[in-house]
Image (cartoon, rainbow, N blue to C red):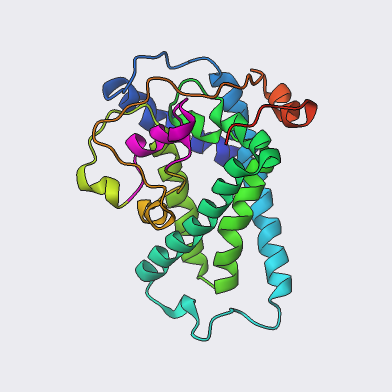
Amino acid sequence: MFFHAIGGFCLLALIFIPLERWLGLRRQPILRFGWWTDVIYYFTGYCIGRGAGMLITLAVSVLMLQQKSIVAVPIATQPIWLQLFEAMLVADIGYYFAHRLLHCVPWLWRFHQVHHSAKELDWLAAVKVHPLDQVFTKVFQLVPLLLLGFSQETFAAYVLISAAIAFFIHANLKVDCGVLKWIIMTPEAHHCHHSSDPGRYNKNFAAQLPLVDWLGGTLYLPRHYRPDRYGIAEPVPSSYLQQLIHPFRRKMTYVP
């Protein structure tokens, strides 16, 4: 498993580092502040994600021993392209709900602050997620897919595509996606969510589909908007271990 993580990291670096140098939104060093901390997040998050995914799958499988799916017509019999669209929609609705809770519930915001503490964005900033934040959102994403009975191929394809989009939307890229920004999330839309302006980071909660934000009334796609700054006012420690214990350590300011 660890060798797969190393291979994935090298592949992502080979793709995004040249792209960010060529099409960079902001001039910033590759090894920007917090980069090595985020490398730790990448490898620990990979292991936590795999472990949480297996535990969630096992738990749902035990609950569903007497029934393969909660729907009358098995979804797994549908064409895989249709399943994939349905899976992305269902999972993103789950993620959207979890993400809004992370912003609206003060004690959940404590954990999500770690992700929003990034002052510079690039592809690696996607993995700067507190483990409890990661597990919380994964439950909301994966449980509906398992209960509905999507095929294993669809499930695997969704995990791969959702991960690719996550790295893409955090990347330091200045790209005009045109009409594509109305179909899938783009760096332009998600960078708005990471703005230091609280009025902006309460927009664009969806992970993949702008449609979900539109349904929730939180879609924000202005033309050519780029945040002046990223991050939050609340100070967050710089080291990995300090960030893990930060949500438990003291009373923190909550900004809705």
| Image quarter of the N terminus | top right
- 127, above or below 57, in the image: above
Looking at the image, which is closer to me, 254 or 26?
254
Residue 85 shows in this picture? yes
Q: Quadrant of residue 43?
A: top right
Direction right: furthest residue? 249
- 240, above or below 48, in the image: above
**Marker count (numbered):** 0
Q: Which residue is pictured at 58% across the width and 59% down the height?
A: 142
Residue 9 lies, in percent from the top left, at 50, 33
Residue 10 shows in this picture? no
The residue stretch that appears in magenta = 184-203
| Image quarter of the C terminus | top right
Residue 108 lies, in percent from the top left, at 67, 41
Residue 84 lies, in percent from the top left, at 41, 64
Q: Quadrant of residue 237?
A: top right
Looking at the image, which is closer to me, 183 or 226?
226
Looking at the image, which is closer to me, 36 or 105?
105
- 29, above or below 144, in the image: above
Q: Which residue is pictured at 46% across the width and 23% down the height?
A: 230
Left/right placement of residue 5 relative to residue 221 reads: right
